[in-house]
Image (cartoon, coloured by chain):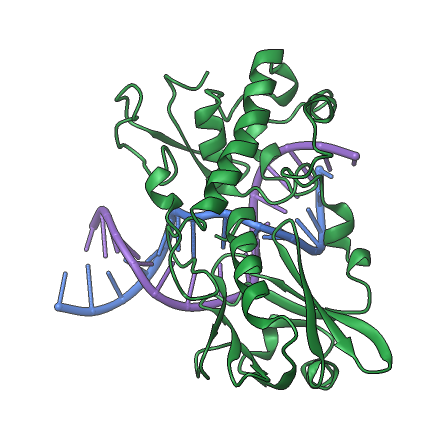
Chain colours: A green, B purple, C blue
Amino acid sequence: MPELPEVETIRRDLEKQIINKRINNVFVLSPEVITTPKPLRFKKLIIGTTIKKIIRCGKLLIFELKRTNLCPVYLTVHLRMTGQLIVSRISNRARVSLQLSNRSFLNFYDQRKLGRLSMVDNWRKISLVRQLGPEPLNKDFTLTRFKQMLKNKKTKIKPLLIDQKFLAGIGNLYAAEILFLSRISPKRIANSLNEREITSLYNNIKKVLKLAIKCRGSSVDTYRDAKGEKGTFTRHLKVYARRDKPCFACKTPIKRIVLGGRGTYFCEVCQQ
DNA sequence: CGGGGCTCCTGTGCGC
DNA sequence: TGCGCACAGGAGCCCC
């Protein structure tokens, strides 16, 4: 489940590998992963462009593609659950494969085909982007702003943290870890948090995401970076996927409940 | 407007 | 041993 740290790791990897490379050809094994435009038009649009910039917006990757004598066009990639972007040789498993001018291939793999690719003229107009909450690692995401954001929220804090309209980039795994370190129960109503709890939550959002980027993400399941390597934040996990295992702080077995339809791991003693 | 529940998708792991 | 089913969860959708 690629979240902000995983997507950012891939973005940085790709930035080193494919900037200024020309897209010479495209191979589409699974046309259903391309939402817009139709695969044939998609191919026509993308072939002959040069990759100029790679932007991350929440969990979305955006490739700025330059065309001669024309406005740039943007390729967007959402990895969803099992999507991978790996630079390697030609592959018959890749759902979509971009052949680059240095004879390497940017391969989009996706076991479950939930990931999505599209081509747009203006990525800022995509509804997903427009609705996105603040980037938790940006300077404009201040403690004051966070307090303001929580003020009138009557929902449970865990589903709120993974709501992309509230905050960009946090998913199920990092929400669980952030709440454990903040010693806050996932069931708490957002506007019931006191000053001290909000500050702790704010600090841990930044701390966990930064450390996870340093670790190149978490490879619980299928996540791989752009070189096909696993991330090492997995070994820092305190609660996620640790059902019935002893809490590292108090030895109480970690609980798994369902909140907002998602598995939620926490220690009911440490997190109040 | 908000929250709950369903859908997409397939490999994995469990119980009978 | 083999089958059927629940489960994993990001995002979009419908519905109340």
Estimate the x, y position of residue A164 in percent, counting from the top left.
65, 43
A30 horizontally vs A49: left or right: left
* Residue A150 % position (x, y): 69, 24
Q: Residue at x 51, y 81 (%)?
A: A104
Query: Which residue is depicted at the point 61% across and 66% down?
Result: A116
User: In the displayed structure, does residue A246 sit left or right of residue A1?
Assistant: left
For the image, the number of numbered tags is: 0
Q: Quick check: A210 left or right of A224?
A: right
- Residue depicted at 70% across the width and 80% down the height: A46
- From this view, report whether residue A139 is shown above or below residue A187: below
- Residue visible at 66% across and 18% down in the picture: A191
On the question of residue A262 being in view, the answer is no
Instruction: Say whether residue A223 is visible.
Output: yes
Residue A115 appears in which quarter of the rendering?
Answer: bottom right
Question: Which image quarter: residue B4?
Answer: top right
In this orientation, which residue lies closer to the viewer: A197 or A260? A197
Tell me: residue A235, above or below residue A17. above
Q: Position of residue A55 (x, y in %)?
A: 67, 58
Q: Is residue B7 above or below residue A192?
A: below
Point out residue A251 in the picture as x, y percentages from the top left corner: 25, 22
